[in-house]
Amino acid sequence: MRVLIVSMAALAASISPAAADTLTEAMVSAAESNPTLAAQRQRLSATREALPQAWAAALPQVSVSGSATARDSDSDNPALESDRGETWSSSANVSQLLFGSGRVLASTRAARAQIAGAVADYELASQTLLLDVTRAYADVRQAQAVVAARETTVSNLTRLLEYAQAQFDAGVVTRTDVAQSQARLAQARTQLVQGQGALAAAVQAYQRLVGRPPSGLVAPSMTPGLPTDLQSALDISVDNSPVLIGAMADTRLADANVDVAAAQGRMNVTLEAGTSMGADFNDDTTESTTDSVGVRVSVPLFQGGAIRSRTRAQRALRSASNLDLAAAQRSVQEAVTNAWTGLASARAAVDSARDQVEAAELAYEGVTLEQETGLRSTVEVLDQEADLLTARIALAQAERDLVVAERQMLAAIGTLSIPEQSGGPIEDDQLRGR
């Protein structure tokens, strides 16, 4: 058991170098190195290409082509002569859409809505990552506090066991007091090993998100930007929540898709011009040139009902998007309300836990002194030590919950970000769409 405790303590020491990290530095490192967020950024860049693709339909379309052919024909009929020739031809064509019944405009609106939705998805992924980093950061600090508390408990119980043994040797107490001290010490050592294992797991979760192991994590500073009341939080979430912004972008996309589908069954007017040349390689007199220019009008008259069916489908999807938006509004309202309640509870829990620790420490000191004068039994001191450990662990849990609750509040209203003065990565304007 002692060998295992020493090895786990060495692991805890190896992951806590002298240099100290802050929560902001952890967020910056995660934003720069996390592969999940980087993949989401690439998806956003790919989505942004939908806009130039939509514009392309309204721009001139130019194509050129060329060919060279060698021909050799023979016949078994002696009256027919063999025919051999080598010819070439080239052509250039230009077309310009003059009127597309709103198809290009609808496609452009759809592209802009796609980009807005992709930006919202990226913001959601970014804020989710920052919240996960906050949890990992707070989990490591909590695990470290728990290990420190259990180490203190092991030290205290070791001293109590030595005192009980000395008292037993002097004939003051019975063997039962020594056995009780030994049992509590063995239990404390087991719990210390378990706490060190939990710390190692928390460190691995932190390294997965941030990209490097924790280094002397310091207590996070006050969280700026928290709303002052629930109604303010709800109002802020309407304009900033990525969930709502993405849902609204989906409704705009669905509306544009209805117009895109309907435009497929309407008139298109295109200006077309072209030129072509051709000749025989062995006879320059055969060279010819043809130029053409004209307007092409096309109107789908009957497509088997496919266009109308696609339009009806898009209208149904538009209705579904509007319902999804209503559901998202309810979901965000619930998340903000729960986050506000959780933040208030976390603040109260920290204050209560600190009072509990102060009272437990005072009680432990008193019981220990009373034991030395014979007013308290060994088991009473052991019970008070257990109460003190419980209070310290509760404080570590409450402080962890408060750190997470504050960032959870910001994430719920859509404003969780890396402080600008931290020197963190500045978002590329291109990520915002056009």
Image (cartoon, grey):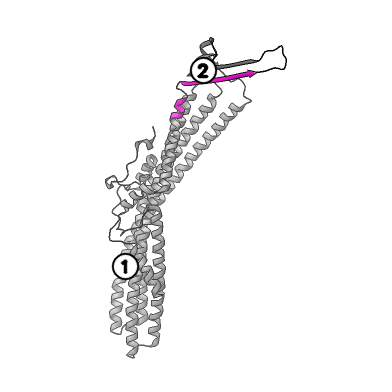
Residue at position x 29%, y 81% from top?
Answer: 370
Using the numbered discs, state the Cα–Cα distance from disc 1 to disc 2 in whole angstroms: 90 Å
Give the amino acid type for the residue marked by disc 2 in the picture. Ser
Magenta region: 52-72
Question: Farthest residue toward the front?
Answer: 78
Q: Position of residue 319 (x, y in %)?
A: 52, 35
Q: Position of residue 108 (x, y in %)?
A: 45, 28
| Above or below for 177 versus 51 | below
Residue 242 seen in the figure:
no
Cβ atoms under marks 1 and 2 closer than 8 Å: no
Who's the residue at 71% across and 11% down the image?
A: 79
The single residue placed furthest to the right in the displayed view is 77
Give the number of marks.
Answer: 2
For disc 1, the neighbor class at 10 Å (few under 14, some 14 to 19, many from 20) is many
Q: Which residue is mark 2?
A: 90
- Number of other residues with Cα within 10 Å of mark 2, as a class: few under 14, some 14 to 19, many 20 or more: some
How far across and down, in percent of the image, does residue 236 sit?
A: 36, 42
Tell me the residue that label 1 is attached to. 357
SS for callout 2: strand
**186 vs 9: above or below:** below
Q: Nearer the viewer, residue 313 or 119?
A: 119
* Residue found 30% across the figure and 70% down from its top: 359
What's under tag 1, amino acid-wise?
Val
* Residue appearing at x 51%, y 21% in the figure: 65
Q: Magenta segment: does it hold 332? A: no
